[in-house]
Amino acid sequence: MVNLKKITKKGRALFLAYDQGLEHGPIEFNDKNVDPKQIIEIAKKGKFTAVIFQKGIVEKYSAEIKKSKVPLIIKLNGKTSLFKGEPMSEQLCTVEEALKLGAAAVGYTIYVGSAHENDMLREFEDIEREAHAKGIPVIAWIYPRGKGIESKSSSELMAYAARVGLEIGADIVKLKYNGNLKDLKWAVKSAGKCKIVLSGGEKTGDSEVLQEARDAVASGAMGLAIGRNVWQNENPLKITEKLREIIFK
Ligand code: FBP
């Protein structure tokens, strides 16, 4: 198994995700978070165990990222919200490029259930093989979407996503939490030795975010890979401090 030490602390993870500019557009941003430098500051001052960017941001802000010393996860594929049709996320960056840019780990999204699932699984396997040959961890964002998931329950899909991660060779799977702790515990169990982190989702209240962090810990998940609920928060460092108390206590 590859070593996750570079992107974790005490076996737990708190990743700051900032690929929403591509995935959703600058509609997610305001004056306090539109500049990637602001996110690097939050990642540094908030002592995140890693920060997640697409390669373009890493290329343009490499000096600031290096100076911050926050470990870097580069997302290798992505899509915009403008494309309509069965979900597909194309590879935009190679493992080699990511390593040259200083990545400590790489990430890739797979929409299981999509008509394009095969393409993403195949692309993921190439990435996984290369990343593991070079000794770096692979994080799979596994989001069930598309035609294939109609009539399936959220609990079934969450556990399925977790299990897919284990079976395709991911070191960490990033899941969207359905809010039910019993379901999450089953998903974590289904992932076996593959670790789980939860995404934060759309901006909600502080108490909901903190509850998600508590549920992550209670379920045996590794932590959070969270974006909007931190950098859209009125006080990103204050909410981060509370998250840290829960995740690393
Ligand atoms: P958030 O915590 O802001 O939800 O970020 C998690 C994340 O997986 C991002 O990495 C990604 O940009 C976004 O959610 C994708 O969300 P969706 O696919 O639901 O639009």
Image (cartoon, rainbow, N blue to C red):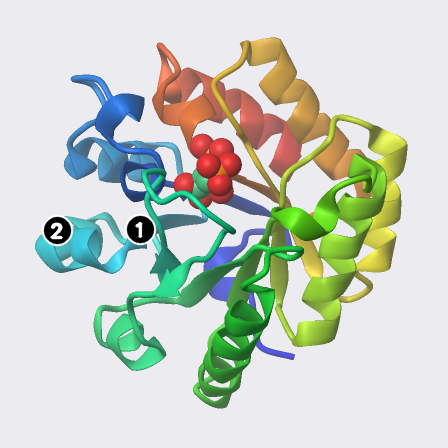
Say whether residue 169 is left or right of residue 137.
Answer: right
The residue sitting at 55% across, 9% down in the picture is 205
Quadrant where the C terminus sits is: top right
Q: Nearer the viewer, residue 91 or 95?
A: 91
Q: Nearer the viewer, residue 115 or 166?
A: 115
Say whether residue 150 is left or right of residue 146.
Answer: right
Secondary element at tag 1: strand
Q: Earlier in the sequence, mark 2 or mark 1?
A: 1
The residue sitting at 90% across, 34% down in the picture is 182
How many C-alpha atoms fall within 10 Å of the one at disc 2: few (<14), some, or many (≥20)? some
Give the residue at mark 1: 53
Position above or below: 120 against 111: below
How many C-alpha atoms fall within 10 Å of the one at disc 1: few (<14), some, or many (≥20)? many
Do the residues under discs 2 and 1 have CB atoms within 8 angstroms? yes
Q: Nearer the viewer, residue 81 or 92?
A: 81
Amino acid type at circle 2 is Tyr
Position above or below: 53 against 110: above
Kindly tell me whether residue 27 is visible in this rendering.
Answer: yes
Q: Position of residue 125 (x, y in %)?
A: 55, 80
Identify the disc placed on residue 181.
Answer: none
The residue sitting at 46% across, 78% down in the picture is 127
The residue sitting at 16% across, 17% down in the picture is 31
Identify the disc placed on residue 61.
Answer: 2
Secondary element at tag 2: loop
Please name which of the two marks, 2 or 1, marks the residue nearer to the observer.
Answer: 1
Amino acid type at circle 1 is Phe
Q: Position of residue 213 (x, y in %)?
A: 65, 29
